[in-house]
Image (spheres, coloured by chain):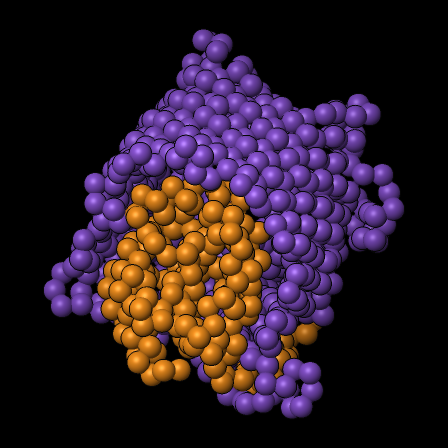
Amino acid sequence: MTPTFAVLALMGAGPAHAYELWGTGPLANASVQLTVDTEFRYHKTGLENPGQRLKNGPFELIPGMPVHDYFEQVGRFNLQVSKEDLSIGLQLDEVALFSNRYVLDGEEQASVPLYEPQVQSPFDDSYFLLEKMFVSQKWDTVDLTVGDTYGSFGRGLALNIVKNTDIDVDTSIRGAKGIFRLGDFDITAITGITNKQQISQDNPNVAISPNIDHMVSGMRAEWFGPVTLGAHAVVYKFARPTEIPLAVPVQRYGSDLDTSVIGANFEVNGLAGLDIYGEYAHYDYRAEEMTDGKAQLPGWAAYGSVAAYPGSFVVLLEGKASKDTERITTFTTPEGWEPASIPTLEYERVITEDGAAAVNSNDVMGARIRIDYAVIPGSLTPYVAATYLLDEDTEGLHFNDSAEDILHPMTGIEWQKNHWAVQLNAGHRVDKRRDAKEGSDRMTHMDATIHFPLFGEEALEIDLDIKKFEWGINEQQQEDFAEMANALAWHRGEKWIFVLYQDWTDNPLIQSEGNLGFIGKNFYGALEAQYKPSGNLTWKAFYGAYKAGIRCSGGQCRSLPGFEGARVSLSGVF
Amino acid sequence: MRTMNQYISRLSVFCGVLFAGIAHAGETAPEFSLRDINGQEVSLSDYKGKVVLVNFWATWCGPCKLEMPHLDKMDRELEEKGFEVISISTDDARAASKVKPLIKRGGYGFTVLLDKDTAVVSKYNPAKTLPYNVLINRTGGIHKVFQGYNPGDEVELRKEVEDLLGSGS
């Protein structure tokens, strides 16, 4: 039990305070901020494979524990050193598995392989690395960052490599980035090798793979006048998985490019009461993996938006069209991130496997309009929205074998007064195939958050998320199903929250199993207690299970595995 | 195979060194420059001498939207005392067109900046917990941070702001 107690003691350790840490050197009187996120998990696997732990042996943390259940401890430590216009950042990630070993036929085995053979670690069941590091200096007209940085041009059609921790995706560009501010002109230059986050903080770490070193370089010029004008170019050279681990990243600069993208945009605010944005990008693919074997393949994408504010109304119209744009994700999709893509126009909470493919399609065009009416600004705002998309791509993950028309009307309301709050969204989406034999896919959805005070400082929060799917004829999914993910939270004063989670689905293809079989098949339940002793510190303890599923944030989607077991986590800023 | 005990002891030593080196004396807020939703450049240093609340949020974040009316109220009511809210949208580029309409429908008057490439939020809030508020004193030091929002949290936040305005620091 010693390692468990050691980890828990470590998690509870508070910061020691030291002043003038850096003496009289260049960092004298610099300030330091440490962010700590750490979690200890018990994974209940339910596997009944043969094998046994050695009784009282090194692999047994709890006597009688099932052979393939195991513990996982993950941690992330972010250190930021700041002095005037200088910032230095380091991020250390670490993971360790406990009780992960057993004996079968006299041979020691691992229930879960933590990392792939190409990954270097001095320990069999633990791994740590300096995941991110950067030095950033700001002068009057120049911002310069060396190390891990992020890049996004325009609306992300050509380059959009950003941190997206909401879905546990954090790929940076390890190199250099400079922003030169010359009056009304901004010039941004960025170059480096991609550095994908390897240790997951939210999901089980299994078979961690080595980083794949893709080269990205780009430049953008922007003029901020009565109209904002921008132009940019980005080039990519992707690593091939077969090169690992011998490839030298710097070689990417000296070899033929796989893709180049050039683009331009304009933006005007307040023109006849309208905010208008437009962008175009042209893709030139050269890698045979992207061109279906041809020497070269072009692609293009366009995106535009118009916002108007007549009276108490807010109207946002977005439109897009593309041809062969998603080929730019050919090499990085298996890694779970995207270097660039067009705005989806879709409501993210209802994006499914099919939806993700359709709205981020190679060949798609359409528009979305949303009209809000601020009955009481900041307090009561109902809205209606409608999306129309024509998806002509029938390859890859697409469920459709013929072009399809997608129509998605929605409505909702946001209301809050005193400590009452309601956020409600509901809609119905139809993906109608032009080949009538294929039929249509239909989805009806509703999600809501309702918060209301009880007495004193007590409050209740109800979160609902319900979807029903009816499928047409396709190869991936034929059986209709429904699913829901709900929560009931009891806010007890400012410091305590107790949450009851409940998931359910009758999706026959779900890749997880419910823990509440006595209620019904595929019922999942969990309890969580959150303790927030101060604004900068949150403790959480979770026990139970939740289902697998797809989750989207910031235009990126990721399939997340289900979980059953227990978790204790600490998140703090010191 | 090296044992877990070895691993734990090494990790403990590393973290002990890390924790032991923390200076906590009113950390300086990292300087930044970003464009606002109308294209104007705004720097944190423009607000020197004021108490500033830097609020990180995103259009998809429900609690962030619930918190905004309270931040706007504070911004309006305490402006004369030297208080400003700088609201930083951490939406990535693809959602940037949604930011200004959301601000307009709420009628909010505070400054709204776009951190489309997540460069600033990565410095202040690497875990990207949202909403995330950083209260900065008149000398540019970080006074306190607040993670997340539940209805009612604005009471403590306002008290901290008023105390800071009253203290003169």
Answer yes or no: is residue A245 visible: yes
- Residue drawn 75% across the image and 36% down it: A259
* Direction left: furthest residue: A455
Q: Quadrant of residue A328?
A: top right
Q: Colour of chain B?
A: orange
At horizontal 51% and vertical 52% (from top left) the residue drawn is B40
Where B18 falls versus A91 (above or below)?
A: below
Of residues A425 and A143, the one drawn nearer to the viewer in this rendering: A143
In the image: residue B158, left or right of residue B53:
left
In this rendering, position of residue B146 left or right of residue A60: left
Residue positioned most to the top: A436
| Image x and y of residue A108, in percent | 65, 63
Residue A362, image x and y in percent? 60, 27
Question: Does the image show residue A205?
Answer: no
Establish if A68 lies above or below A20.
above
B138, B156: nearer the viewer: B138
Q: Above or below — where is A266 with respect to A31?
A: above
- The hue in which chain A appears in the rendered picture of the protein: purple
Q: For the point 36% across and 82% down, which residue is it?
A: B168
Is residue A572 shown above or below A332? Answer: below
Q: Where is residue A455 drawn, in percent x and y?
A: 12, 64
Residue A221 image-quadrant placement: top right
Q: How many marks?
A: 0
Along the line of sight, the residue nearer the viewer: A546 or A335: A335
Q: Is residue A261 left or right of residue A495?
A: right
In the image, A311 versus B147, the foreground residue is: A311
- On screen, residue A54 versus residue B133, left or right, reads right
Residue B15 at x, y percent in the picture: 58, 79
Based on the displayed image, in which of its 4 quarters is residue A163 positioned?
bottom right
Q: Residue at x 74, y 52 (%)?
A: A191
